[in-house]
Amino acid sequence: MLLVLDNCEHVIEAVAASAVSILRGAPGVQILATSREPLHAEGEHGHRLSPLESPSPSAGLTAAEALRFPAVQLFVQRAAAILGGFELGDRDAPVVAAICRRPDGIPLAIELAAARMDAFGVRGLATHLDDPLQLLTGGRRPAAPRHQTMRASLDWDHELLPEPERVMLRRLAVFAGGFTLEAASAVAAGGGISAPEVVERVANLVAKSLLAADVGGAVPCYQLLGTTRAYALEKLRTSGELDQVELRHAGYAGPVQRTTAERLALCGRQIDDAGAAQARPSSPTGDASIGEAPPVHAVPAWSYS
């Protein structure tokens, strides 16, 4: 018998205990559990889902080439259901590919984007994705509330976090690209969170699929996916911590003297790991130092489940 337990993250302790009890008492049963984080139960084998793959940016991308990628296939399928016969043409293929890349290949986000095709069309939709939390709404009514909008989905994840991990998530939103544990400790520690505690909370956010990890380089590299970062930045602004966290970010000078090649060698990608890794305006409270440092452009991370 195969027993399927779906969306276990909000009852993770009870599910883990039940799974162990069932497997010990009924050796012929196997369990398939889906969750934002592992059960950490005896005999568990994890499989982390990657984002749906999208085409790389290419002006000459054809519809046939784009449709080889699962993110584009999902978008076209959902758009056709909304518009009653939408077909992807060569002219729109690069635009649809860009739409699928923007929400980091997250299936729910791609479905919600396609649901807005009737209001904006392909090109209008592409221009409105700068504010994904406002645009990505309108899920199917029979779906669970957390699957109706991207904000509701992220609210669900956020509410399940203990307060220290909520604090860590919003502070890490100042990084526009990848970052190392060294940078995270320098920027996110403080206000009751020590540098050693940063390490544990980063690991917990990775385990809960809210932080992407690339461990293939010389040191691990981490990144918030785009929609998650937009949400976390909102939380940082409303927390009253934005200025002080941005000041720590602007003042962090760990790898400022590293060359681009050295930054790339750290974790296989260029990283937002130097002081003020993106150009910022002066702080609302008048601290011009927040906006003084040079930009360092970053490459998106790859992992999501």
Image (spheres, grey):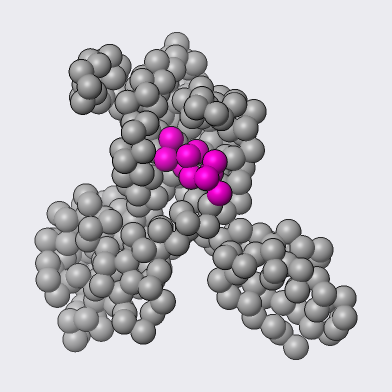
Residue 9, image x and y in percent? 58, 64
Determine which quarter of the picture holds residue 4.
bottom right
The quarter of the rendered structure image containing the N terminus is: bottom right
- Indicate yes or no whether the magenta region holds residue 168: yes
In this orientation, does residue 168 appear?
yes
Relative to 183, does residue 134 appear above or below in the rendering? below
Relative to 110, does residue 141 appear above or below in the rendering? below
Figure disc tally: 0
* Extreme residue in the top direction: 257
Residue at x 65% of width, y 64% of height: 12
Relative to 188, does residue 114 appear above or below in the rendering? below
Residue at x 19% of width, y 85% of height: 85
In this orientation, does residue 64 appear?
no
- Indicate yes or no whether the magenta region holds residue 21: no
Residue at x 23% of width, y 15% of height: 288
Residue 68, image x and y in percent? 38, 68
Q: Nearer the viewer, residue 50 or 130?
A: 130
Judge from the rendering whether residue 225 lies leftward or rightward of residue 181; answer left or right: left
Q: Nearer the viewer, residue 168 or 41?
A: 168
Residue 229, image x and y in percent? 37, 45
Secondary structure predominantly adopted by residues drawn in magenta: helix
Judge from the rendering whether residue 22 lies leftward or rightward of residue 126; answer left or right: right
Range shown magenta: 162-171
Q: Nearer the viewer, residue 92 or 274?
A: 274
Residue 225, image x and y in percent? 41, 48
Determine which quarter of the picture holds residue 239.
top left
Relative to 70, does residue 53 appear above or below in the rendering? above
Determine which quarter of the picture holds residue 198.
top right
